[in-house]
Amino acid sequence: MAMAVAQHRESSSGSSIDKHLDSGKYVRYTAEQVEALERVYAECPKPSSLRRQQLIRECPILSNIEPKQIKVWFQNRRCREKQKKESSRLQTVNRKLTAMNKLLMEENDRLQKQVSQLVCENGYMKQQLHTVNASAADASGNSLVATPQHSLRDANSPAGLLSIAEETLAEFLSKATGTAVDWVQMPGMKPGPDSVGIFAISQSCSGVAARACGLVSLEPIKIAEILKDRPSWSRDCRNLEVFTMFPAGNGGTIELVYTQTFAPTTLAPARDFWTIRYTTTLENGSLVVCERSLSGSGAGPSAAAAAQFVRAEVLPSGYLIRPCEGGGSIIHIVDHLNLQAWSVPEVLRPLYESSKVIAQKMTIAALRYIRQIAQETSGEVVYSLGRQPAVLRTFSQRLSRGFNDAINGFNDDGWSIINCDGTEDVIIAINLSKSFSSTSNPANAFSFLGGVLCAKASMLIQNVAPAVLVRFLREHRSEWADFNVDAYCAASLKAGTNAYPGMRPTRFTGSQIIMPLGHTVEHEELLEVIRLEGQSFVQEDAFVSRDIHLLQICNGIDENAVGACSELVFATIDEMFPDDAPLLPSGFRVIPLDSKPSDTQDSLTTNRTLDLASSLDVGPATSHAAGDAPSCQSTRSVLTIAFQFPFESNLQDNVANMARQYVRSVISSVQRVAMAISPSVLNPAVGSKLSPGSPEALTLAHWICRSYSYYLGTELMRSESLGGDSILKNLWQHQDAILCCSLKSQPVFIFANQAGLDMLETTLVALQDITLDKLFDESGRNALCSDFAKLMQQGFACLSAGICMSTMGRHVSYEQAFAWKVLEADETTVHCLAFSFVNWSFV
């Protein structure tokens, strides 16, 4: 081994020979031969390449080397390259682990200091309890993070501003790395190898505060540039304007910043901030960007600019960014705010008094965005349709910002409310000056449009998880949307088209195809294109495509993930999908109200699925189901809906009436869906049924298995799986897709096991809207019709391999299918038909 290493070193240092071990002996190569082999390998690294063989034959210097020896040389060369790549990867991982270990050690030291401080404070408090001034001492002991009051005079001179900036820096560092705030781990965010970072929220302090620290593969200056440009990463930031900037004398800069944020609902005003921002470099090389509000409610821009905002307060907050050896940075983020919760309705105050909400909307969002940029920069992110990550990210930001604009309707953007006397459930606002031209292509402007009309509303919903509701709205658009309204909005995108709902009636075929474009690092947000298939009622337009394309973002649909809200925002888009496409976003936002300590337990009870799986572990013999139901009743969320419609000046009243009626219809549909998918409704322990008039799930499971055995002469499941209540669970988990449909003139499905729901890409609630004819393609329907008489006569039928369709429009192949009658307990009455699809898979 030592000889091999020595010979390799000799070759790499410029020797005229290269050696490798082949069949127990070393083969010698000249420098020219090695150079020729390297050229061949560089051009054709794949071993099976015909081009490689051709190059070897065309190279005279390699003619005296046996093919076997050349093959061994290439194998060794490939192994050395793999070893080099693996070594580089391991070095990168080792640097990251070293940096993370350093971060964890610092966090451990901070926690130890916090424990020591709490022990000292506890002993001090015990002593003070024996004195008359215990309450005064207690108040003074808890003033550690109180905001020092600065007079307006301090903010009127550079020296005063520098003094405030230095105090802000000291207080920020005491929160980021010290014990100024009693931090506790954020619920649901456990640190680990796959975690984005370490997250904590304040336990008891003035205002609401959140903290995050993590490792990011970007340089400190780049991170600071991104985070200071808040509108680029914060979906809640409407505008950020730097009014004054001057050097601080120590190499840093001081800025006076005015920031406006969006309100999440239509029920409360938006917030703005007037702050001082201090950027400097510490002695250890760390870069710091810290910020705090300046005193005085009237400070900052003119009152006219802030008329629609409530002035909130930023307590010392910011970013501490430290470079790591070998590249990358360790970043500490602190957000500490006072959002003036007194100015919002009581039902919304949990959103403004919760440190968890601040962490989700600001702190975690900032760290996730930085990591997203780092992965895109390194080339780790690959998106569909050949789009660059920055382009798709811009689409997501435009959809989100347009939706926030519609919800808030600021006057300085041109919005004004019409016909609102305070009693209307739907708010109608118009914007006659809204621009539809793309910044990169003004030729796309809609010259014929009179403006944009927005119909919006907010309401309280109970007993349904936001993720579950939004996921249902995404997967089952036909449950709430009107295809003709989508067609109207799509037609309005085409310049010169004078369209109005009802003028060109179109029928929605029910086919909704979702084409993913991209997603964020942790899949918390999806960007996708939706294609809705339509057919014209007019004979002469029968061959004209009526398909509609929507660009859509969806976030917060994972019930187990930690998120501030769940959203579904979409806009019609041209089928060519241009980068500068004009967008007019509409959609839904569902925000949970969960600031109480009991919310963690409540959230566990709401994390139920839309299918029968939630009932399989909950039966008559279990005791925790009854306890879950009351907890679900206390789950509350705020649902905000906003739909935008372009209109021409002469059609404003017509479009306003249509929009009002449409949004009311959508609200009614969403309320119906929310009630249907409520855990208390789906839970058999509180008396639910699979569908009106059908037997309970356990009884139906017995009927299905008994009828299968009666007609086909074999057992659907093993005999030991048929006893007691376990039959329902085993039927639910059966590998074959099992579906049951009613015996009506238009058969509809009434039950499916988990495999059946997966095959159809639907839920038990939506299953009842799927008819049997939608399951099969044309050949499948013909085969079923030919075997249907046999099925009704002898009680069963075997269907050959074929293709069926999911509700998402995807083709599903199956090797074999069985159909049989499901008999009730009297063994004479046919309750429904059952189908079993064997070895199914998506094509």
Image (tube, rainbow, N blue to C red):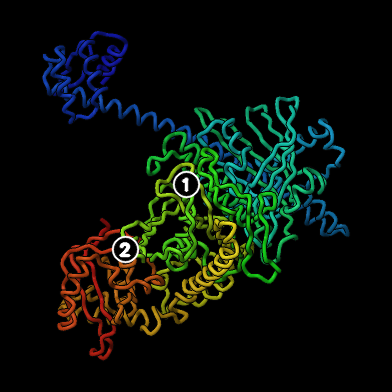
Q: Which residue is mark 2?
A: 806
Near-viewer residue (139 or 739) = 739
Residue 694: give x, y in percent of width and height.
Answer: 36, 83
Side (left or right) of 170 relative to 838? right
- Measured in 3D between alpha carbons, the distance from the residue under mark 1 to the one under mark 2, in whole angstroms, is 27 Å
Closest to the camera, between mark 1 and mark 2, is 2
Quadrant of the snapshot with the C terminus = bottom left
Vertical comparison of 814 with 71: above or below: below
Figure quadrant of residue 10: top left
Disc 1 and disc 2 in contact, CB within 8 angstroms: no
Mark 2 neighbour density, 10 Å: few (under 14) some (14–19) many (20 or more): many
Mark 1 neighbour density, 10 Å: few (under 14) some (14–19) many (20 or more): some
Near-viewer residue (625 or 108) = 625
Q: Residue at x 20, y 10 (%)?
A: 30
Residue 545: give x, y in percent of width and height.
Answer: 35, 56
Residue 200 in view of the camera: no
First-in-chain label (1 vs 2): 1
Near-viewer residue (646 or 563) = 646
Quadrant of the snapshot with the N terminus = top left
Near-viewer residue (800 or 360) = 800
Residue at disc 1, secondary structure: loop
Figure quadrant of residue 430: bottom right
Q: Residue at x 67, y 41 (%)?
A: 240
What type is the residue that disc 1 sits on?
Thr
What type is the residue that disc 2 sits on?
Ser
Q: Which residue is mark 1?
A: 520
Vertical comparison of 631 with 4: above or below: below
Residue 801: give x, y in percent of width and height.
Answer: 17, 64
